[in-house]
Structure formats: C-alpha cells, structure tokens
Image (tube, grey):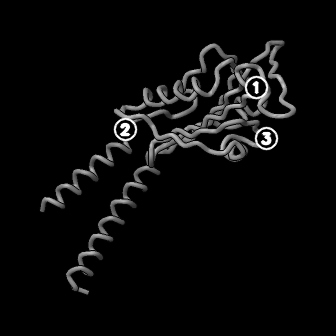
Amino acid sequence: MILKITFAVLAYLFLVYLLLPGPESINDFPSLPNSLKSTEEGDTIQIPNIAAYFSYEYRESVIPYYLASYKKNTLFPFYPFRLNHPPEFAYSAIKDQTRSTYLEELFYPFRDSIFINGFEPYYKDGTPKFEGATNIVVEDIFFNTKTTLRFYPSTIWARLVVWLGIITSIILLWNITKKIVFNKI
C-alpha cells in the first residue's frame, strides 16, 4: 500500500512538473546585455524561435546569463541541465551554415530546451582562435562575438502524452515484474 501511495505521489509531482508554465518562445528570453540584435537573414523571422546578438561578451558570461534567465522563466527551484555539444552540431541545432566555436544546450528534461551557439573568432587577448579568423563587423562597428539562440518549446499535449507513456510503462513493468518474481505466469 505504501508503494502505491508513493508511486501516486511521484506521478502527481511529475505531472505538476510537466504542466508548470515556462517560456513559450524565444521572445521570453532577454537580449544579451550591451549587444546589437542581428538582422541578418536567418537570424530573425525566417526560422522560428531564433535570435542572434553581436556583442563583446564571451562564453564565460553568456552561458551563466542565459542559465539564470531560463531558470527565472520557470517556477522550478533548480537550474536547467547543461549539455556541451560539438560546434559542428550547430548546423543541425541552430541553422545551416552557422559559424560556431561552441554550442551548449540548456534544458529541463521532458519539457523544452534552448541552444546557445557562440562564434568567437578571437581570444580575449586578440589572438585568432583559428587560421583565417575574420573580424565581425556590423554597421561599421567591430564586435568580438556573435551569440545565436534557438529555443525548442514543447506543447502541453506532448508533455501529457510523455507523462501518460511513462506512467503506463512503469505500471506495466511493475505488473510483469510481480508475475515473474512471484511465479504467477
């Protein structure tokens, strides 16, 4: 009986976790401070839930900024998980022909995620990171970095289907395990 009550409570808490409101689009995330929003093709309305910023901010300040912002957009008492992807994955995760020196994903499991792609052709001291590094010039202004965000939201219905699938699977596996353990097959 205690096991059933524990399962019911955990299933309910998991459902609450999935149904709590969170960000719905890229517009729910603030612009990068001291930056210029990109108007280049592909960085605005052509691809949904994408935004890009030219700035002087490097990875060590960009990631914590969006980590805190993502947490603030939810009611969870914990930060989102953080995954580091190879920069080559930016072609798939962000958009085709995305220049990248780092790509990180922030996500809440079974909910949604945001990819943060950074292009930093030079180190902070001005030395190039790779051969052929070029300056980022926009409107006759030199920038050190370009940060591109792509948000992948999930719908309430998709989360409910995931919840139902997981709960049903656990119940089925429990029943099969009971039959095997107690030799009732």
Name the N-terminal-most of marks 3 and 1: 3
Foreground tag (3 vs 1) = 1
Name the N-terminal-most of marks 2 and 3: 2
- Percent from the top left, x then y, of residue 79? 42, 34
Give the quadrant of the N terminus: bottom left
- Percent from the top left, x then y, of residue 151? 58, 37
Looking at the rendered structure, the number of numbered marks drawn on it comes to 3
Residue 117 falls in image quadrant: top right
User: Between 134 and 11, which is closer to the camera in this rendering?
Assistant: 134
Report which residue position mark 3 lands on: 97
Q: Element at badge 3?
A: loop
Kind of residue sitting beneath label 3: Gln
- Percent from the top left, x then y, of residue 6? 19, 55
Kind of residue sitting beneath label 2: Leu
> Residue at position x 61%, y 34% from top?
116
Foreground tag (2 vs 1) = 1
Crowding at mark 2 (Cα within 10 Å: few <14, some 14-19, many 20+): few
Q: Would you say the residues marked 2 and 3 are in contact, meaning their CB atoms lie under 8 Å apart?
A: no
Report which residue position mark 2 lands on: 20
CA gap between label 2 and label 3 equals 35 Å
Residue 123 falls in image quadrant: top right
Residue 122, numbered label: 1
Q: Is residue 45 left or right of residue 78?
A: right
Q: Is residue 14 left or right of residue 68?
A: left
Q: Is residue 182 left or right of residue 94?
A: left
CA gap between label 3 and label 1 equals 19 Å
Residue 146 falls in image quadrant: top right
User: Between 53 and 128, which is closer to the camera in this rendering?
Assistant: 128
Crowding at mark 3 (Cα within 10 Å: few <14, some 14-19, many 20+): few
CA gap between label 2 and label 1 equals 41 Å
